Image (tube, rainbow, N blue to C red):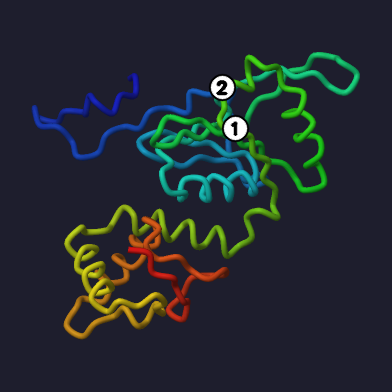
Amino acid sequence: MVSNPHSPILIDGEPMLWVEPLRHDGVRNVTPKHLLNTNGSAVFNNREVQHESGTEKKVASFLKAQPGVVEVRSQFKTVEYHDQDGVLHKHTIDYCVRDASGRWEAVAVKQEKKRAEVEAVFKGMLPEYRDRFHKLTVMTEQDVPWWVVRNADSILFYRELHDDHHVNTLMDELQQRGKVKVCFYQMYTPGVDRPSRTTAIWRLIDLGHLKPAPGLINELTWFTVEI
């Protein structure tokens, strides 16, 4: 069966709420997951996103949680580049990221000790490939410490759960208070369902209306309010 999010599966003539996501559809697939590796996949905006290392998995979470990102494609494009000796090579981009304005970013994931190798690939990339991307980025394990990944995973989790009513209610409260700074726990209000308020807080973080101080976000985190 061909994956198509616009053609839901029918049971007794009624469409299912779940729709099979589009496949990875990259130039190559990661090897199957087993106990000795971290290969696997997740789904973002109805499309499979693969990873073949722990760092790639962390980077994928970070990318998916970025504001304005609408598509993340794994192993999607192969580009050509010249090395320092002028020899032509091919390189497969780990992640191609598209934002809401249609701009594409190429993201290469490597160990920090190999950062220079990938930077050389981008530097030597042929113009016809370079022109496809608005931005070229190298990411290593140093760019995705554990707290960055935890924050990103929370943003993605609460993004799926948020309710616009609770989000708008919290925005109104923050505007009425007129505060430039607010702590996470200060946004809980008597009479407001705590889980719904927590979800609303994370949604405002996701939307960029609450700018957190660096570090793991918890109930003692301070935010700059931008509404």
The location of residue 105, given as percent across then percent down, is 55, 34
Q: Residues within 10 Å of mark 2 (few under 14, many from 20)?
A: few
Would you place residue 178 above or below residue 138 in this image? below
Q: Residues within 10 Å of mark 1 (few under 14, many from 20)?
A: many
Task: Determine which of the numbered discs, if any, sits on residue 132 in the image.
Answer: 2
Q: In which image quadrant can residue 93 be found?
A: top right
**Which amino acid type is shown beneath numbered disc 1?**
Ala
Give the side of residue 87 with respect to residue 30, left or right: right
The location of residue 96, given as percent across then percent down, is 54, 31
Image point 56% across, 22% down: which residue? 132
**Which amino acid type is shown beneath numbered disc 2?**
Arg
Would you place residue 44 above or below residue 143 in this image? above
Nearest to the observer: residue 208 or residue 70:
208
Q: Which residue is mark 1?
A: 106
Give the side of residue 186 with respect to residue 35, left or right: left
The location of residue 193, given as percent across then percent down, is 21, 76
Q: In which image quadrant can residue 149 be found?
A: bottom right
Viewer-nearest of labels 1 and 2? 2
Would you place residue 4 above or below residue 153 in this image? above
Q: CA distance from mark 1 to mark 2?
A: 9 Å
Image point 21% across, 59% down: which residue? 163
Image point 29% across, 65% down: which residue? 200
Q: In which image quadrant can residue 174 be found?
A: bottom left
Give the side of residue 141 with respect to residue 116, left or right: left
The location of residue 35, given as percent across then percent down, is 63, 47
